[in-house]
Amino acid sequence: AESLIELPGGETETLLFCLQASIGTGVLAFGFGYLVAKKKYTKV
């Protein structure tokens, strides 16, 4: 199965890295905010 997107190796690697980094950052930020909010509203 050939890849649908044919880009030069360097560009593809950079794109994937940026995508991974942004997704990871979003997940971490969401998880951190969720935990903080949970603690805040549990104590009251």
Image: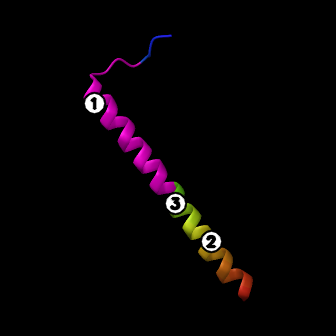
Q: Amino acid at mark 3?
A: Leu
Q: Earlier in the sequence, mark 3 or mark 2?
A: 3
Pointer 1 residue? 11
Numbered badge on residue 28:
3
State the mark number for residue 23: none
The residue located at (72%, 87%) in the rendering is 43
* Residue that appears at 48% across and 52% down: 24
The CA span between labels 3 and 2 is 11 Å
- Which contiguous range is marked in magenta? 5-26
Q: Quadrant of residue 4?
A: top left
- Neighbor class of circle 3 (other Cα within 10 Å; few <14, some 14-19, many 20+) is few
Mark-to-mark CA distance, 2 and 1: 36 Å
- Determine the image quadrant of residue 13: top left
> Which circle's residue, 1 or 3, is located before the other in the chain?
1
N-terminal-most mark, 2 or 1? 1
SS for callout 2: helix
Quarter-of-image position of residue 17:
top left
Q: Which label is found at residue 35?
A: 2
Would residue 2 appear left or right of 7 to someone viewing this image?
A: right
What residue is at 49 percent from the left and 55 percent from the top? 26
Residue reaching furthest to the top: 1
Q: Are marks 3 and 2 in contact (CB under 8 Å)?
A: no
Amino acid type indicated by mark 2: Leu
